[in-house]
Amino acid sequence: MTKFVATSCYHCGLPVAEDNNFTSLMAGAEQAFCCFACQTVCETIHNAGLESFYLKTPQDESLAPPPELSSELDSYDLDDIQADYVDSLGDTRTIDLLVEGIHCAACVWLIEHALAKQEAVISAQVNLTTKRLHLHWDNRISALSALLKALGKIGYAAIPFDKEIAEGALARQHRGLLYRMAFAGFAMMNLMWITIALYSGADEGEFKNWFHWISFIIATPTLFYAGYPFLRNALLGLRHRYLTMDLPIAIGAMTTYSYSSYVTFTGSVVGHVYFDTVVNFLFIILVGRYLEAISKKNALSATTRLLELQPKLATIVVDGQAQVVPIRSVNIADTVLVKPGEQIPVDGVIIEGQSAVDESMLTGESLPVVKTVGDHVVAGSINREGAFSVEVRHVLRNTALAKIVALMEKAQASKAPVQCTADKVVPWFVVITLSLSAITFIYWNQFGFEQALLAATSVLIITCPCAFGLATPMSVAVATGVGADRGILIKHGAALESLSKITHFVFDKTGTLTEGQLKLITIKPLAKLSEQDLLKLAASVEFQSEHSLAKAILIEANEKKLELMPVTHFISSPGQGVEAECNGKQVQIGTIVWLKNSGVEFNSGWEKEVLTLESQGTSCIFMCIEQQLVGLFGFADKLRDDAVDMILNLQKQGIKTTVLSGDRLSVVKAITKGLGSIDRYAEVLPKDKAEAIQRLQQQGDLVAMVGDGVNDAPALIQADVGISLASATDVSIESADIILSYNELYKVSDAQQLARRTLLTVKQNIVLSIGYNVLMIPLAMMALVNPLIAALTMPISSLLVIANAARIRQLFKDT
């Protein structure tokens, strides 16, 4: 039989066998290890210069021996396999990995620093809560399997993240907690009968010692099985010189158990046993933690609901035959058949058939939208009526639904500034708890050892920073779920905190305050070309542009079925115009200012006509061929229906509002005349938009920028909070902190209300958690609360915080 010595493994803390020969020179001393894997991992960590890992702060989880690596790591290098997990199959790739072996913040530090030393790794970010690694690497330098093996060398096994696997791991954790809780509950019920017998007079009879021994036999396995997580984390926390919140619980349980065991073994006629107290408060604490875990899961249900929208099967059509396959087997350009009542499994374009599709999960529109050939459909939406065929454009993690879920998960894992402050305070709770418990014991010991023991134990159990630690992350997590339900996608918690304090909102005009559906209403030839010739040439040049004016020209050309001409040397000047060569001639289309700066001459007559059009809200641009004016184009746009109410609502709150536009001032004034005392800045170039935001910030304003389009990206980045509408281009969305996925402007006001409600809830939770400790600790120190009551109240504080955070959903629903 293998014997274990007192020495624990230098890496994982497990006992070291007496006949063990796994030792190595570490930190100037001979260190022992429980196995070859721990020794190898530790040597790798030290050789990489990362030995400070062992000095970093562990949280509530312990280290463990290194997990075994999968024998199929090399298969993850295949593009066919990676296609299901990476963002693209280019030279640089991004993947989410589920990492086994992450236990604490030190693990996060070690993984990120170890991978940073790998030449191929561009970035590596670990989420401690979800045990996931977001890895961005250069596939030309190193294969994915090599990086996974590098992780294995420092003690972590990683595989591509799969929702089903992750849910299975979470279910196992809950199941383990439930088993320990059930064991403690069974022991508590049996001890209850013994306690009743002792309190009924058996403690003075001849069977007193027998009852004590039976209590000891029941309490011992309960303490070391049901209480194992507390004891393990407390010991390993001490080993790493960190006082975890499991330490007071462990000290309270072990002290009470040890004293009761002493009375039992010595047969003392003076002392009493408190095995029932140990078992009871372990059971209640486990119940509290289980309820806390379930409450967290329910509070974060918005993400789960979105994940459930992704169908797991799809019907693909191959050679005219329909066959049902797993969604992972669907490829780009496949044809998917969607029958009535089914959820659409992919993002794509309808190539045959038509139907009414419910897209409320993405657009917020409650009425089904009629979709015909050529229209786009998104995964997760529901086909209400006829059948249709879809050509696949995006699957799995690249669908709009998956991107929304990814944004929510990123926000829920992020930390708001107020949370960072809370995190610094939490570790001091343990020191304060131990100190107060010692003072309590010393004071009450003069009145009796047992009374001092119970009072000190009550202080140890009742003091809990868990509620304080949950105050911010639970509120942010619930808020991101509520926001997602309303089409407000929040990328990180800091954006919520900043948005609640915004004093100045800046809006882009075209596509943000206005509908962005510019219509070409005027074409005026200024030379020999006809209107049709002007339109054909303009559409050919503007074909490569993303600007809303270009789209309006192309729509008009398509309606007139004009055939475009080939162009070369296309150049776009953001906010000013475009130029290209067509039929060997240079063609320029843009604003008066830009064309004048290019050397084009304008006569006063045309400028007067432009002013007349602009005073009516018509935006004008000109076309030149070889520096000669040949035509004028006029465009009309109108304010969004909700723009006036939204701006006036912000102004009533005392918030300043500004509109920035690349358009002429006369056009801006004409279109925004119903917006009250809004500040207007016209003919602002993209780079000038960012500078305008910066000037407002220098004046002491906290600025939120609401934009739509590539031109707004610099300003969105410069602002304290960048808000982008879902109609925006990919660049604009990447630059934003908050995305309004329903493409509705009044959601700006909703987002700010949600941010303020969230910050208020965070403050309420902090007051709740501090108030609980301020009230209960003195009661425990005065011996007015016994360990059982202490165990009952400790999880209640966390549950109150979770419940208060969950109220955000109901309170915001009522606004």
Image (cartoon, helix red, strand yellow):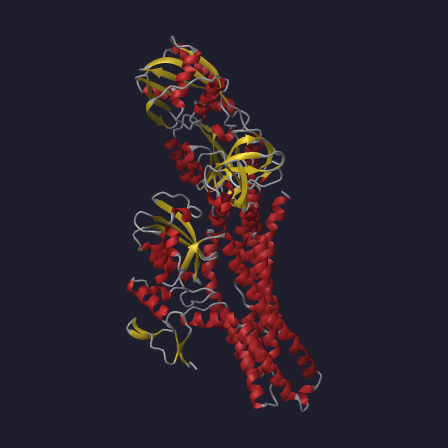
Question: How far across and down, in percent of the image, does residue 549 sit?
Answer: 44, 23
Q: As drawn, which residue projects farthest toward the bottom?
A: 206
Q: Which of these two is toward me, 389 or 703?
A: 389
Whether residue 745 appears in this view of the structure is no
Residue for point 29% across, 62% down = 48
Whether residue 389 appears in this view of the structure is yes
* Quarter residue 14 falls in: bottom left
Q: Quadrant of the C terminus?
A: top right
Question: How far across and down, in percent of the image, does residue 640 sit?
Answer: 55, 28
Q: Residue 257 vs residue 594: left or right? A: right
Q: Which of these two is toward me, 96 or 274?
A: 96
Question: How far across and down, in percent of the image, does residue 811 sit?
Answer: 62, 47
Q: Quadrant of the N terminus?
A: bottom left
Q: Residue 202 vs residue 120: left or right? A: right
Question: How far across and down, in percent of the image, does residue 96 sit?
Answer: 43, 51
* Quarter residue 734 falls in: top left
